Amino acid sequence: MNKRALYFDYAATTPVDERVIQVMIDCLGFNGNFGNPASSSHTFGQQARQTVEQARRQVAELVGADAAQIVWTSGATESNNLALKGVAQARGAPGGHIITSQIEHKAVLDTARQLQDAGIAVTWLVPDADGLITPQAVSEAMRDDTFLVSLMLVNNELGTVNDIPAIGAVVRNREALFHVDAAQGAGKVAIDLAQWPVDLMSFSAHKLYGPKGIGALYVGPRAQQRLHAQIHGGGHEGGLRSGTLATHQIAGMGAAFALAAAVFEDEKKSIAALRECLLEQLLSLPGVRINGSVSQRIPHTLSLTFSEGQFNSAALGQSIAFSATSACNSASNTPSHVLLALGHDARLAGRTIRLSLGRYTTAEDIDKAVELIKTACASAPAFWATGL
């Protein structure tokens, strides 16, 4: 049996926590809580509904929202689509203007391009040298017809953290709606939607030790009457997202968010310590540099660029699971649009790796990874022939 690789790709997805798995199992099988949450006439459906509403509260509690403001979706991609398309369609008028950035997840970028094709003007903000979108940049891009701004909380490749409260204040002052993709931020950044000037926020369970295929969209009071459903048929979720609710996945997301709340401080400290150990050793190698702000970031994600001829990715073989870019870029085998926006050319982007740490990363994993990467550097060819 082959030895498993070290896992340093938590930003792509996380393993489901064993405690979450048990919660999900309890919702399966004839002896489990398998009822349809919409079947209110009997106890099977009523119990399932109770589980769904408990999970809704658990998600809301982690991010400082009211449970009634959480709408279930199939994941952050659907949440992003619902937010952008839903707000655009609810306007009932052609044209208008939205603001996003060049370093968003493809679920926002591709959706914004579709809206642009439909006649809506889009401003694509360029990140600063630290990989951040500043409140000033947003303020300067605002127009009289701007109705929506969509920016991520944590960049999925760099790990940088935008100042969402400050940006939100700018957006709200101009009476536009503010959507935030928080797929990479929930459980890693303290989010308080009761205080933050944010109208819509997207979440995904599988980035937080929950199952794939389930997510949520926070819909604040300013957005409730300015959002059109994208999936119809039954009027579920207050008419915003129809479809039979997947009790086991929803329960899993709720359990994952509750666990994240319980371990938030301790987990953040432990991962920060591991990251510092990893970073200290890798930055001792000549020519290695970190991409993005060194201070305004989560500790979980590192983007490192190696000097030419210094890193031989093939030498790692199947020893370390890491990424050269986000999972969406890897699927299309294209250079990272985030790194290109930061000024990297294709060759620099090809010499960049993303290492992301998580709940199950150990000090031993760090030491082994450093040893393997140093070996890969020692075996690097004199010239760079292929990208990562």
Image (cartoon, helix red, strand yellow):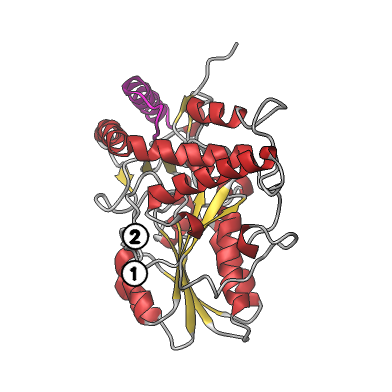
Which residue is label 1 attached to?
167
Q: Which amino acid does label 1 sit on?
A: Ile
Marks 1 and 2 sit apart, C-alpha to C-alpha, by 8 Å
CB of mark 1 within 8 Å of CB of mark 2? Answer: yes
Magenta stretch containing residue 366, yes or no?
yes
Kindly identify the residue that appears in the image at 46 percent across and 48 percent down: 57
Image quadrant containing the N terminus = top right
Q: Which amino acid does label 2 sit on?
A: Asn
Q: Where is residue 228 in the image (x, y as percent from the top left)?
A: 62, 71
Q: In this view, does 93 lie above or below 203?
A: below
Main structural element of the magenta stretch: helix, strand or loop?
Answer: helix
**In front: 51, or 118?**
51
The residues colored magenta run: 357-380
Q: Position of residue 124 (x, y in %)?
A: 47, 72
Residue 384 in view: no
Quadrant position of residue 45:
top right
Kindly identify the residue that appears in the image at 34 percent across and 49 percent down: 189
Instruction: Estimate how packed mark 1 is, as few (under 14), some (14 to 19) or many (20 or more) residues with alpha carbons within 10 Å.
Output: many
Along the polypeptide, which appears first: circle 1 or circle 2? Answer: 2
Which residue is label 2 attached to?
162
Numbered label tally: 2
